[in-house]
């Protein structure tokens, strides 16, 4: 419990803003984390590693879909992992 309190204390007194963090008791890889999340949502776990070029294509396709009247944006350039600036 002290570890969690110390981390929260450090984050509150740091320059970091508008970020989210996951604290856990052990070391978990991203693959294990996303597989667990997918299982909880009753979805297939990711099998392909998303590369930067894939994200670049994805946000462009989503942008083109928003030009059609029946679609809303699911992914935009601003929330793409390739976006160089924090929002």
Image (cartoon, rainbow, N blue to C red):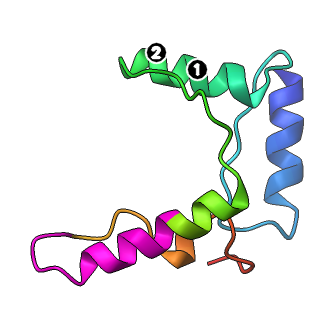
Task: Give residue 2's position: percent from left, percent from top.
Answer: 87, 24
Determine the residue positioned at 86% across, 70% down. Answer: 15
Which residue is more in the foreground, 52 or 30? 52
Q: Is residue 84 visible?
A: yes
Q: Point out the image quarter for the C terminus.
A: bottom right
Counting other residues with Cα less than 10 Å from the Cα at mark 2, is it few (<14), some (14-19), or many (20 or more)? Answer: few
Q: Quadrant of the N terminus?
A: top right
Question: Residue at the spot x=81%, y=16% of the render?
Answer: 25
Where disc 2 sits, the SS reads: helix
What is the quadrant of residue 27 in the picture? top right
59 vs 44: above or below: below
- Residue 53 x %, y %: 67, 63
- Taking the image as shown, residue 45 lies to the left or right of residue 27, namely left
Direction from residue 79 to residue 21 in the image, left or right: right
Q: Residue at x 60, y 69 (%)?
A: 56
Question: Disc 2 designates what residue?
Answer: 39
Q: Is mark 1 on a helix, strand or loop?
A: helix
Towards the viewer: 18 or 86: 86
The residue under the point 70% across, 25% down is 31
User: Does residue 47 belong to the magenta stretch?
Assistant: no
Of the numbered discs in the image, which one, if any, rests on residue 35? 1
Q: x%, y% of residue 23?
A: 75, 31
Are the two marked residues, 1 and 2, in contact with CB atoms closer than 8 angstroms? Answer: yes
What whole-number distance in Å separates the C-alpha atoms at marks 1 and 2? 6 Å
Q: Can residue 80 be seen in this view?
A: no
User: From the viewer's perspective, is residue 75 above or below residue 8?
Assistant: below
Residue lying furthest bottom: 67
Q: Is the magenta stretch mostly helix, strand or loop?
A: helix
Q: Identify which residue, 24 or 28, lies in the foreground.
A: 28
Magenta residues (range)? 58-71
Residue 61 highlighted magenta (yes or no): yes
């Amino acid at each position: 419990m002290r570890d969690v309190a110390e981390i929260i204390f450090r984050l509150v007194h740091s320059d970091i803003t508008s970020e989210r963090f996951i604290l856990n008791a052990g070391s978990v890889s991203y693959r294990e984390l996303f597989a667990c999340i997918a299982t909880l949502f009753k979805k297939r776990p990711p099998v392909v590693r998303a590369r930067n070029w894939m994200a670049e294509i994805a946000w462009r396709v989503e942008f083109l879909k928003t030009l059609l009247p029946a679609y809303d944006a699911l992914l935009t350039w601003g929330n793409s992992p390739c976006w160089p600036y924090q929002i």
